[in-house]
Image (tube, grey):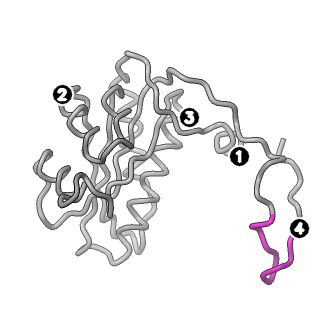
Amino acid sequence: MLDLLKSRRSIRKYQDKKVEEEKVDAILKAALLSPSSRSRRPWEYIAVTNQEVLKKLSQCREHSSQFLASAPLGIVVIADPEACDVWIEDASIASVIIHLTSHSLGLGSCWIQVRERMHKENVKAEEYVKQLLGIPEKYHVESIIAVGYPAEEKKPYDEEKLLYNKIHRETYGIIKRIPNID
């Protein structure tokens, strides 16, 4: 797992290659296995492979989500706030599970934050996505995860550059370096 975490990087360039249905199914199954508070499972997922829809979804935020247009798969993570008061956390955990599962299958991915972001000056990104995909009003959109075969290569994280000063032991201010995990 630690090797998976070190090598997973945000990928914003994708090969022109469809993600196999078996891999899409595996990613979605993993998302359904995501932990949630009190097992309320407030999340739901919309897997989008239609290139025209992906292109429109890539315009949900100004500038920062354009790479979704070249991804063969986008997974929209939505949640029902009536099902659980910590739906944001649950949907975020599910989004990370989608990232890690995608990476374990040889795919790249990148998170597009939707909740609390703007599409245009007076239109929230969430409202744009909900209208485009016909999402019922009661749901909120947390994120879109772009998924595909990487068309860029990024080096794994360097353990020597990890921010060890952000780890405290027993009380705040007691810092101990963690040995390499290799």
Name the residue beneath numbered marker 4.
176
Image point (24%, 63%), residue name: 140
- Residue 34: horizontal and vertical position, in percent? 44, 56
Secondary structure under badge 4?
loop
- Residue 4: horizontal and vertical position, in percent? 65, 40
Secondary structure under badge 1?
helix
Q: Which of marks 1 and 4 is in front?
A: 4
Q: Which mark is residue 104?
A: 3
For the residues labelled 1 and 3, the Cα–Cα distance comes to 12 Å
Marks 3 and 2 in Cβ contact (< 8 Å)? no
Q: Residues within 10 Å of mark 4 (few under 14, many from 20)?
A: few
Three-letter code for the amino acid on which mark 2 is drawn: Glu
**From which residue to which does the magenta span run?**
165-176
- The answer to whether 12 appears left or right of 120 in the picture is right
Three-letter code for the amino acid on which mark 4 is drawn: Lys
For the residues labelled 3 and 2, the Cα–Cα distance comes to 28 Å
